[in-house]
Image: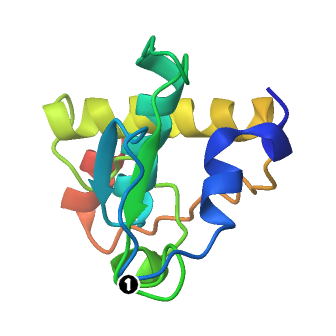
Amino acid sequence: MRPSAHPLRSLLSQTYSTSATPSPDVHTVVIGAGVVGLAIARQLVQHIPVTSSSSTTTNVLIIEQEASYGQSTSARNSEVIHAGLYYPPGSLKAKTCVQGKALLYDYCESRGIPHARLGKLIVAKDDAQVRVSE
């Protein structure tokens, strides 16, 4: 699906009144239009089919307290794709961080989303850190 044709794109471009009554065609309400809320809404729209007289896809209403999406905690994101270096080697956090990094780069590349693989220079300050880095 082209990015401009995605159902969430048109949903996010609309402004809703705080007194509006949700349409009876809304199947799910997501609270919060940050990274997590939008990811949940996207998954619902893409993967949860609803068969009704007026729709064959899930209609999601996103409720956000800010004037636009991604303005609260999501706006303070450091925009760094972490490599998992600071977690104990072999730990669940390290494994999921490395896997998530690969998935995020694949996602960006497959959709033409600009990103940069800048890498990281790590300098050991003592012999113990040299051993860990090897």
Q: Which residue is mark 1?
A: 72
Q: In the figure, residue 104 lies in which quadrant?
A: top right
Camera-nearest residue between 37 and 29: 29
**Residue 51 higher or lower than 72, as above or below:** above
Residue 91 drawn above or below residue 124: above
Residue at image point 32% right, 75% down: 125
Q: Is residue 63 above or below residue 26?
A: below
Q: Quadrant of residue 35?
A: bottom left
Circle 1 SS class = loop
Q: How is the image coloured?
A: rainbow
User: In the picture, which quadrant includes the N terminus?
Assistant: top right
Measuring from the top left, give residue 17's x and y in whole percent. Answer: 47, 81
Categorize mark 1 by other alpha carbons within 10 Å: few (<14), some (14-19), many (20+). Answer: some
The three-letter amino acid code for the residue at tag 1 is Ser
Counting labels gives 1
Q: Please state which of residues 113 and 29 is positioned toward the viewer in this rendering.
A: 29
> Which residue occupies 28% across, 29% down?
95
Q: In the shown orientation, is residue 60 left or right of residue 128?
A: right
**Above or below, comparing residue 72 to residue 64 in the picture:** below
Residue at the image point whose x is 47% and y is 37% from the top: 59
Question: Position of 85 compared to 9: left or right?
Answer: left
